[in-house]
Image (tube, rainbow, N blue to C red):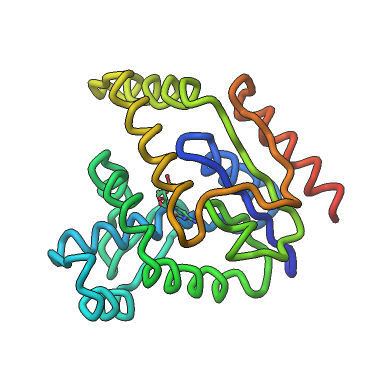
Amino acid sequence: MQGFNVAIDGTSGVGKSSAADLLADANQMIHLDTGAMYRCVALAMEEAGIDPEDESELQSLLDTMKIRFEGRRVFLNDREVTTQIRTNRISNLTSRIAALPAVRARMTGLQQQTTAAGGYIVDGRDIGTVVLPDAAIKIFLSARPEARARRRYDEYRQKGIDADYDRILEDIRQRDWQDSHRSTAPLKKAEDAVEIDTSDLTLDQVVTAIQSLIDGAR
Ligand code: C5P
């Protein structure tokens, strides 16, 4: 849909990305996963051994790195990193480097350029507040930390990965704290966003609720 963007913000593990994927398919729109972009920056910084305090090295990395999506696959400098950016270590590192103003400025610019013509479902932390303050529809997804930790735990177990529920819960709390207490573009609900608590909802129910808002705005 030309000229029409949907912003979906919320905490980690709240189901933003899964909902955005389904909504993009159903509405012939494109899902822009901004968390994956920050994850690519974290991976690139780690691989290049860049000290976050070294502003000029960081800036040149930000100016030269290339992030590309092919459907749900993510490429960093033309190398596929779809699974590599999802490890727990990169998740925790991402939350730290996402607080750096130079990183936020570069990612915000890229996200605004990409979505300028509309037709995007954009998920992240600061989309409704900073990146797309004029988005036609703004959603803020929330869920109790325990519900989010349980989902992630079940996901790991289904994939046959060993998981520790308490550890996952602790990581989620830590990332929530870091994301909502940074001084640049902290996670917060835009005043005009519609909040949906997904703790006791299925993914289908969340998608249906957002779809009815999209239908109403058409
Ligand atoms: O959404 P996802 O969990 O993949 O995001 C990873 C991290 O990237 C978040 O914990 C947050 O620190 C950062 N992020 C951000 N702003 C966004 C999207 C993600 O700061 N718009």
Q: Residue at x 23, y 43 (%)?
A: 89
Quadrant hosting residue 121: bottom right
Q: Residue at x 37, y 68 (%)?
A: 103
- Identify which residue, 127 or 71, lies in the foreground: 127
Q: Which residue is drawn at 53% across and 39% down?
A: 18
Measured along the vertical axis of the image, is residue 3 above or below residue 214? below
Q: In the rendered view of the protein, which quadrant contains the C terminus?
A: bottom right
* 155 or 14: nearer the viewer: 14
Q: Position of residue 97 (x, y in %)?
A: 31, 58
- How many badges with numbers are in the image? 0
Q: Give the residue drawn at x 49%, y 54%.
A: 33
Position in image of residue 138 (x %, y %): 70, 51
In the image as oriented, which residue stretches furthest toward the left?
Answer: 49
The part of the image, by quadrant, that contains residue 194 is top right
- Residue 47 in the image: above or below residue 21: below
Q: In this view, does 3 lie to the left or right of 150?
A: right
- Residue 86 is situated, as x and y percent measured from the top left of the image, at 31, 44
